[in-house]
Amino acid sequence: MDVEELATALREEARRANERRLLVLAGDRDAGAAAARRALDAADVPRAATTQVAPVRVLDCERVAQTRAGELLGTTREAVVFDAHDELHPNALGRVVGAVDGGGLFALLAPALDTWPDRRDDFDATLAVPPFDESEVTGHFRERFVETVRTRPGVAVVDVDAGTVERDGLTHPAPRLPRDGVSVPDDLSFPREAYERCLTGDQVDAVAAFEALQDDEDDTAVVVEADRGRGKSSAAGLAAGALAADGRDVLVTAPEFRSAREAFARARELLDALGESDGGEESPKRVESTSGGVVRFAKPTTAAGMVDAGQAGDAAPDVVLVDEAAALSVDLLERLLACARVAFTTTVHGYEGAGRGFSVRFRDRLDDSDHAVTEVAMIEPIRYAAGDPVEVWAFDALALDARPAVDPLVADAAPEEAAYRAVDPADLLADEHLLREVFGLLVLAHYRTEPADLARLLDAPNVTVRALTWDGHVVSVALLAREGNLPADVREHMYEGGRVRGNMLPDVLTSQLRDEDAGVPVGLRVMRIATHHAVRSRGLGSRLLAEVRAEFEDEVDWLGTGFGATPELLDFWRENGYNAVQLSTTRNDASGEYSALMLDPTSDAGRRLHDRTARRFAGRIASVLSDALSDLDPDVARATLRAVDAPVSLDCSDWEWRVVAASAYGPGQFDQSPAPFRRVAVTHLVHADENPLTPRHERLLVRKVLQAHGWPTVADELGFHSAGQAMRALGDAFRPLVDRYGDEAAREERRRFEE
């Protein structure tokens, strides 16, 4: 059998089964490209229906680079030819494999399989972060990848150098029954045209679930979960179009517009069918209805701001649809819950990662909200048959369906009895069960865990893994990255604005905070830490961090971490010995959070780095809070300052202390000289554990004194009856602070008003 005969047989079988087949063309690149041309011609695949993912065009068809693989999201192709000779980027592969329609072929051009794991490519170069070089990157990810293409059903392998077929990839499936037509119930309130455009019963059920968003009386939430290729975005788009036809303002948000593009196409299609399109100039991010309804797009942080504005009485959307919700942070999703009618669609397994993380981490908050929740799962694929071998292979090769141990196996795990262990890449390669438990927990830990993280876990020389196990099952895991120890030329490059991969903490401290020596000490950054959801809040994460410190404290100068700042996370890290040294001044577009950096020094060099950075942070935080961080959540500000370990300058003149004391005990006014109040407020918040105020008083210090919000706004937000009451409360808050920190001038001023 030659490659033409093989491609013809694969295509015929794929068409009969409404599945896809994978054709691996391994060996010389030019020979592989020539074989791909012959295979496509023999299989009768039109070039117009083919896309090549490659650095240069070698086929007469559409071409995109791996860096632009996201352009294929939401598209349908009869064939995709993926050139992996220069690089195999796991994220790119995960994005494009779903574009192939049932009956189609996914062709992979690869080096000779026997030697491929030993080669180093452009993706490997991204794993060789300074001071490591490319020779220190391993090939475990590709070793595992090659094993999947050699053993999984539906995967054909051709040695193009020898001209031989190593595997034909034919599965000889039993004949499938034709899919029944979609039945549309009569008792639905959306227009029938919306349901007639559904391709599966699951899509009908999903669109019907969105009808709950028409409820104008009660708070309502809809949750749709599905694997990729099930039509959830199309269902959301049809529902959005139906709501717009009813005059509703529908705001769609997603990490990136491309993932929501299909929803807008379906909304526009439905409005056209209903004769509701306004006929105006089309915008890809806005669809309007003649009834006055609209479907519009906004980035997640912008959408949350619109919802917040609605809470304050300004115009807000009637409905918010959140696409790929699992790729957003829990706190940002919770902000969107301020909308009375909100829907979340999310991929359970996919290149976006974190599908199960959404259900575990966010669903508790959703269930505790005032929203009545309607949920639906979409199982049946639309573009190809269930059980499609290429989907099964992709899930396997990229660990898209990795998940932690089932709850009963770890339910009794206790911190003091769990076993601490190093998890080497060789261990993960040899034990697929261990790999899936480790990676499954990491997916839950972060809203943006991706297939590339699997390669990083297996191959990056600066990355190591530590875990706690219970009866052999992983209950807590930490992904650690070695940073720092950078040579002078790299530090100079970083100081002058150049980016240095894989050294997040030294990079920020050097380039943003202007400390050229920050890259000298060596550190270990906790990139991710996750504990099994069935045993959280038992101290397993803290036990794991303690073991990591005990193991590495003599090898590194500092332990550190960076994350989207929330009060809970800041308190967790502080309780485990980490201190805040920086808050970013811009929000992450996807998470909507400001990032916090924290350090736990383990040597004199690490202590010097920590001390000078923390001291500078404490000295400038008041001015930053009144400017770039004026919208920071006051509880995040409180928790951040509580986590600072640094002296705070409280250098107030006698006159300034009299101003502060007169405001607390007499007729003085804060607004006349805010500077000393800010120094006192920062001093208190850094030492709040020693001299606590009520949380409400501390929020008042943040919102008014540090962030300089207007009195009416502060009073409304913090629940005071009037601005005057808020002013009096601020005076009350400063009384114990004057008593604790004030000098003789302050005490004299107090006595004057107490007599």
Image: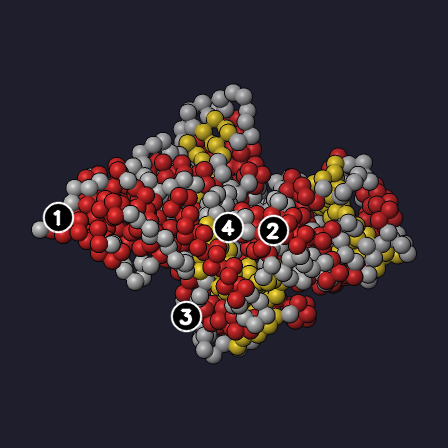
Coordinates of residue 327 in the picture (x, y in percent) = 52, 49
Q: Secondary structure at mark 4?
A: helix
Query: Eyeballing the image, is 245 above or below 714?
Result: above
What label does residue 326 carry, if any?
Answer: 4
- Evaluate whether residue 566 shows in this view: no
Front one among 31 and 687: 687
* Badge 4 density bin: few <14, some 14–19, many ≥20, Cα 10 Å: many
Q: Are marks 4 and 3 in contact (CB under 8 Å)?
A: no
Q: Secondary structure at mark 2?
A: loop
- Name which residue type carries label 4: Ala
> What's the CA distance linking mark 3 and mark 2?
31 Å
- Name which residue type carries label 3: Arg
Query: Eyeballing the image, is 84 above or below 289?
Result: below
Answer with mark 4 or mark 3, whichever residue precedes in sequence.
4
| Residue at image mark 3 | 538
Front one among 413 and 388: 413
> What's the CA distance linking mark 2 and mark 4?
11 Å
Coordinates of residue 200 in the picture (x, y in percent) = 56, 44
Q: Left or right: 668 with respect to 288?
A: left
| Residue at image mark 2 | 351
> What's the CA distance linking mark 4 and mark 3?
25 Å
- Evaluate whether residue 554 shows in this view: yes
Looking at the rendered image, the disc whose residue lies closer to the viewer, 1 or 3, is 1
Answer with mark 1 or mark 3, whichever residue precedes in sequence.
3
Looking at the rendered image, the disc whose residue lies closer to the viewer, 3 or 2, is 3
What label does residue 13 carry, if any?
Answer: none
Answer with mark 3 or mark 2, whichever residue precedes in sequence.
2
Coordinates of residue 27 in the picture (x, y in percent) = 85, 54
